[in-house]
């Protein structure tokens, strides 16, 4: 059994946007290691998902993770009103990784949107591979699947791995 870490997972508000924008840069920087993406000339990275999460579209939900008053991560969920939700973006700052906060946060986010879920990650990111397989096994023991899918409209990129499960597990 996982003990609750000292973390709050809550829906992000418009006033949280500047904080999440700064966390977004850290997230995209971490991911650039696995896809070779470089920042734009102004030092930022692509932000379509960030924009969508704060667009007001009811099919998106953004969450902020905090320890006390300190931001430690975020999650974006898309397809909230669809039969299968997608954990579109998930990030925990390095200073709290391997403390249980990531697992706790993903459990909290998924529990807010019961049903079928999909999560994509890159196979060459060994830490993400271990983390997401552990998440799937903890949330849907023995009842999850994994497959590789091409990245739409990006034949230059390696296929993503997709984990799928149902929560709560019937």
Image (tube, rainbow, N blue to C red):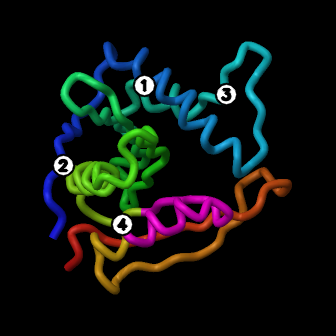
In the rendered structure, are the residues bearing label 4 and label 1 in contact, judged by CB atoms less than 8 Å apart? no
- On the image, numbered disc 4 is attached to which residue? 135
Q: Is residue 75 left or right of residue 89?
A: left
Q: Is residue 97 magenta?
A: no
**Which residue bears the numbered disc 1?**
20
- Left or right of 6 in this view: 66: right
Give the Cα distance between marks 3 and 2: 31 Å
Tell me if residue 16 comes above or below residue 80 in the rendering.
Answer: above
- Residue 97 x/y as whole percent: 39, 48
Q: Crowding at label 1, few (<14), some or many (≥20) Cα neighbours within 10 Å?
A: many
Q: Counting residues from the N terminus, which is met first, the one under dot 4 or under dot 2?
A: 2
Going from the N terminus, do you reach mark 3 or mark 4 first? 3
Q: CA distance from mark 2 to mark 1?
A: 21 Å
Q: Earlier in the sequence, mark 2 or mark 1?
A: 2
Dot 4 or dot 1, earlier in sequence: 1
> Residue 132: within the magenta?
yes
Towards the viewer: 122 or 164: 122
Q: Which residues are magenta?
A: 118-135
Q: Quick one: 62 or 82, which is closer to the camera?
A: 62
Residue sitting at x 40%, y 39%: 95
């Amino acid at each position: 059994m996982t003990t609750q870490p000292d973390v709050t997972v809550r829906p992000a508000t418009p006033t949280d946007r500047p904080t999440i924008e700064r966390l977004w840069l850290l997230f995209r920087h971490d991911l650039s290691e696995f896809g070779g993406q470089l920042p734009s000339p102004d030092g930022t990275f692509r932000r379509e998902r960030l924009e969508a999460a704060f667009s007001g579209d009811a099919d998106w939900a953004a969450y902020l993770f905090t320890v006390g008053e300190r931001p430690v991560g975020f999650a974006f969920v898309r397809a909230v009103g669809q039969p299968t939700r997608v954990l579109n973006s998930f990030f925990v700052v390095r200073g709290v990784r391997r403390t249980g906060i990531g697992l706790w946060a993903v459990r909290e986010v998924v529990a807010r949107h019961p049903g079928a879920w999909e999560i994509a990650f890159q196979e060459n990111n060994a830490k993400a591979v271990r983390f997401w397989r552990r998440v799937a096994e903890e949330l849907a023991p023995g009842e999850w699947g994994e497959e590789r899918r091409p990245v739409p409209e990006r034949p230059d990129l390696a296929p993503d791995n997709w984990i799928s499960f149902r929560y709560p597990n019937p």
